[in-house]
Image: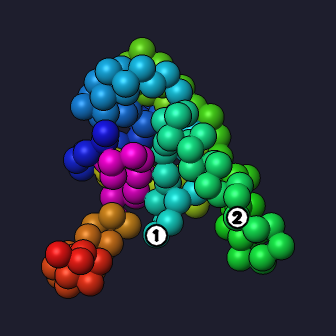
Amino acid sequence: MFYGEFQHSIDRKGRLILPAKFRETAKNQFVEKFFVTRGLDKCLFMFSEEEWRSQENKFKSMSFTKQQSRIFNRLLFSGAQEIAFDRQGRVLLPQYLKDFAGIKKDVMVVGVSNRIEIWSLDTWNDFYANSRQSFEEIAEKLMDV
């Protein structure tokens, strides 16, 4: 559903502009609001409301008697914020989420199929530089072809 990498900047009022391609996809899929929360690898995860509900059901089914499940769910759900973009595709990200991801000004907005990831540009560049060399090796380990 969401694909590609788009470099953007947080405007002087602290708003992020969703890439036009993602706005068009959201419009075509009748997505009116999203949920954004702490992601993995020091980025933010943003889900359409429908995808959020699907993921929420998976995470809620994790046993609360297991400490790792409790910690994961606390951090994921306590960080979650329902957001809606204005007509220009802008949204004000909560400061605590920007702090979590180290977002100051420049960001990379990445489509990862069922979710959008929002990265500090520096963190994304580091991740990409450290990961691209192992892309083929990872593919070989993950795919049973």
Residue at the disc numbered 1: 41
Would you say the magenta stretch is mainly helix, strand or loop?
strand
Q: Residue at x 22, y 47 (%)?
A: 4
Residue at the disc numbered 2: 62
Image quarter hosting the C terminus: bottom left
Residue farthest toward the top in the current orientation of the protein: 87
The amino acid type found where label 1 is placed reads: Asp
Question: Within 10 Å of the Cα at label 2, are there few (<14), some (14-19), or many (20+) other Cα atoms?
Answer: some
Q: Is residue 25 visible?
A: yes
Helix or strand or loop: what does disc 2 sit on?
loop
Residue farthest toward the front in the current orientation of the protein: 145
Image quarter hosting the N terminus: top left
Q: Is residue 134 above or below residue 92?
A: below
Q: Residue at x 71, y 55 (%)?
A: 60
Q: Is residue 126 magenta?
A: no
Q: Left or right: where does residue 67 sit relative to residue 128?
A: right
Q: Compare marks 1 and 2 and give the one earlier in the sequence.
A: 1
